[in-house]
Each structure stands twice: as structure tokens, then as C-alpha cells.
Image (cartoon, rainbow, N blue to C red):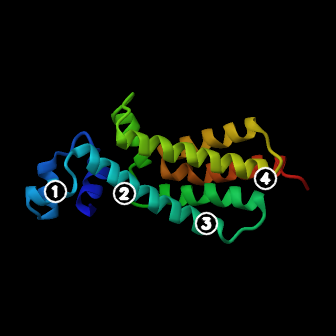
Amino acid sequence: MTAAAGLFYEYGVRAVGMAQVVEAAGCGKNLLYKHFPSKAELAAAYLTLVRRERERAAAEALRWSVDPADRLIAMVNEIADMVRRPGYRGCAFRNYLTEFPGESDEPARVAQTFLADSRAQLDRLVTGIGGDELLADRIWLIVNGLHSAPPTQAQVAVDWVTELVHAAAPA
């Protein structure tokens, strides 16, 4: 799984063949196919692993804040920190959906569910500060842009969300 995750993230799911995963993992083909009978199942497992990692990072970022406005800013700041890391190549979920537009396979469902759940979490945080759907849409648009912007723009996204949140949050 570690070998596949690294290859999928670096090169994209479409570009990586099962033979490359076998070679990188140093395992036999039969062992790989025993655990993951298809590339789609391996890709779904990869995205599920990434989801667990993202949820753990988000929970850690949110756990230190009680105030809804601070929690919302902390969530965006955590994403900005991720974007600044060396080797960041975009959001794994958005990348998959871009590689396979219109797909309804298991990996696409994992990606779509993660994004929907992330948006729902953002919506709850926005509601917690008394914000409306327009504010949620604006922050979601900033988050989407953050995933594809150069790392040097990450702080701009955090600052912009901070401004929006403070303007919407009750004094």
C-alpha cells in the first residue's frame, strides 16, 4: 500500500501500472492481486488511506480551538501548511477526479464522499459563526484554489479566510 500510495500520488493513478507497484513494493504479483484484485480496488484503498491521514490532520488542527471562528481559520491554515510541504502535488481526491472525470467507480466514490464530507464540515463551522451559504461557498472556493495555487500563495488564502470569518463572526 505504501509503495502504491507513493507512486499514485507522484505520477497519478492512471499513469501507474500494477507491474510498477509490484516492482516498487518488492512483492510478487500474486501477493498484490490477492490483496487488491484490481487497480480500482488498490486506488480506492489508497484514497481511503489518504482520507484517514487528512481526517487525522484536520482533527489535530481543530482540537486546540474551541471558538468556531478560530476552528474555521485553523482548518484552512492546516490545508495551507500541507500545501507548503515539499513534494505537495495537489489534493489526492481532486487529482483522482481530474484524472477520471465522470467515473463512478469505488475510488471516485471515495474521493467524492471525502470532498462532500469536507464541505459539510466547513458548512457546520460557517454556521457556527452565524455565516451563510454564500460565506461557505466563498471559503470553499478559496480552499479549492489553495490546493492548486503555488505554495507562496498559501498565506494569502489563510489571510483572506481570516478576514471573511472575522467580518461574519459576531463580536
Whether residue 61 is situated above or below residue 18 in the rendered picture: below
Amino acid type at circle 4 is Gly
- Residue 58, image quadrant: bottom right
Q: How crowded is mark 2: few (under 14 residues within 10 Å), some or many (20 or more)?
A: few
What residue is disc 2 on?
87
Q: How far apart are marks 2 and 4 (CA)?
A: 34 Å
Q: Earlier in the sequence, mark 1 or mark 4?
A: 1
What residue is disc 3 on?
61
Amino acid type at circle 2 is Gly
Camera-nearest residue between 117 and 143: 117
The residue at the point 40 percent across, 60 percent down is 86
Helix, strand or loop at disc 2? loop
Q: Which of marks 3 and 4 is nearer the N terminus?
A: 3
Amino acid type at circle 1 is Lys
Q: Which residue lies furthest to the right in this view?
A: 171
What residue is disc 1 on?
34
Q: Residues within 10 Å of mark 4 (few under 14, many from 20)?
A: some
Can you say which quadrant of the picture contains the N terminus? bottom left
What residue is disc 4 on?
128
